[in-house]
C-alpha cells in the first residue's frame, strides 16, 4: 500500500510540473490594444521588409544545434509620424508559414518599439527562420527598422548576435 501511495505521489508531482507550451510572444493581447485603421492608401507609402532570425544555430557539426532566444524589435524610426504594420509573419527554415502575430493593422507611435519574442525552447523555426513585415508610412517618413537579437546563456558562457531587416518592396 505504501508503494502505491508513493507511486501516486510521484505521479501527481510529475503531472503538476508539466506545462502547456505557449506561442512565443510578449503578451499577445497587446496587439489588440495597438489595433489601428490604416488611413487612405494614397496618403501612405507601402513597404515590405525581410528579417532573418535564428532560433537554432549549428554547434560543433551539422548534427548538433544550440537553441537561442530571438528578440524581434519592430521600431518606428520617425520622431514625428505614426506608422502602421499590417503583417508580421514568421516562417521556418523551409519557407513554411508558422504564424502571423496579428490579424489586423497595428500602429507604432513616433520612436516607439514593439517586440516579439521567440522563446529558446521554441525551435519550430529552425536554423533559417525569418519574418516578413508589411507596413505603411506617410510619404517622406523614414522607413521602420526591424532587428533581431539572438542570445543564449548557459552557466557563465553567453552567445549573442544581431540581424537587421532588408526592404524587399
Image (spheres, rainbow, N blue to C red):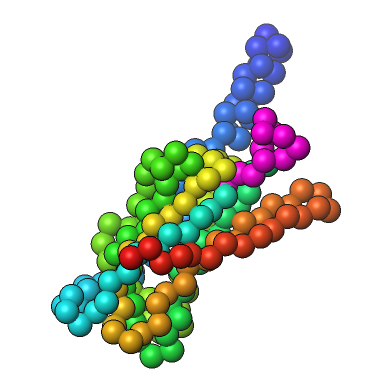
- Horizontal and vertical percent for residue 45? 27, 77
Which secondary structure is most common in the magenta stretch?
strand
At x 63%, y 49%, the residue is 68
- Residue placed furthest toward the bottom: 80
Question: Is 77 rendered above or below residue 161?
Answer: below
Which residue range is magenta in the image? 55-65
Please identify the quadrant where the N terminus is shown: top right
Residue 85, by quadrant, is bottom left
Left or right, 142 with reference to 122: left
- The residue located at (60%, 26%) in the rendering is 12
Residue 96, percent from left and from top? 39, 40
Q: Is residue 36 visible?
A: yes
Question: Residue 110 or 138: which is nearer the viewer?
Answer: 138
Give 158 or 19, whichever is nearer the viewer: 158
What residue is rendered at 40% in x and 77% in y? 143
Residue furthest right as drawn: 156
Above/below status of 152 relative to 124? below
Q: So how many labels did they put on this image?
A: 0
Image quadrant containing the C terminus: bottom left
User: Is residue 160 in the magenta section?
Assistant: no
The residue at the far front in this view is 168
Along the line of sight, which residue is nearer the eye, 90 or 13?
Answer: 90
Q: Is residue 27 toward the left or the right of residue 3 in the image?
A: left
Where is residue 117? Give x, y as percent: 52, 56
Question: Left or right of 129: which side holds 102?
Answer: left
Q: Quadrant of residue 5?
A: top right
Can the viewer see residue 115? no
Coordinates of residue 22 in the picture (x, y in percent): 47, 45
Q: Residue at x 28, y 84 (%)?
A: 139
Instruction: Establish if 23 lies above or below 61.
Output: below
Quarter holding residue 83 = bottom left
Amino acid at each position: 500500500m505504501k508503494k502505491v501511495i508513493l507511486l501516486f505521489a510521484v505521479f501527481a508531482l510529475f503531472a503538476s510540473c508539466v506545462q502547456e507550451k505557449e506561442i512565443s510572444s510578449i503578451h499577445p493581447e497587446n496587439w489588440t490594444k495597438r489595433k489601428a485603421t490604416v488611413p487612405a492608401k494614397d496618403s501612405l507609402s507601402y513597404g515590405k521588409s525581410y528579417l532573418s532570425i535564428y532560433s537554432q544555430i549549428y554547434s560543433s557539426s551539422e548534427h548538433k544545434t544550440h537553441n537561442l532566444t530571438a528578440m524581434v524589435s519592430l521600431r518606428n524610426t520617425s520622431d514625428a509620424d505614426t506608422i502602421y504594420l499590417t503583417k508580421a509573419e514568421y516562417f521556418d527554415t523551409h519557407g513554411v508559414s508558422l504564424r502571423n502575430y496579428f490579424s489586423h493593422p497595428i500602429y507604432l507611435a513616433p520612436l516607439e518599439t514593439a517586440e516579439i519574442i521567440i522563446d529558446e525552447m521554441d525551435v519550430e523555426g529552425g536554423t533559417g527562420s525569418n519574418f516578413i513585415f508589411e507596413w505603411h508610412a506617410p510619404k517622406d517618413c523614414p522607413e521602420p527598422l526591424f532587428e533581431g537579437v539572438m542570445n543564449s546563456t548557459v552557466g557563465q558562457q553567453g552567445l549573442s548576435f544581431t540581424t537587421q531587416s532588408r526592404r524587399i518592396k
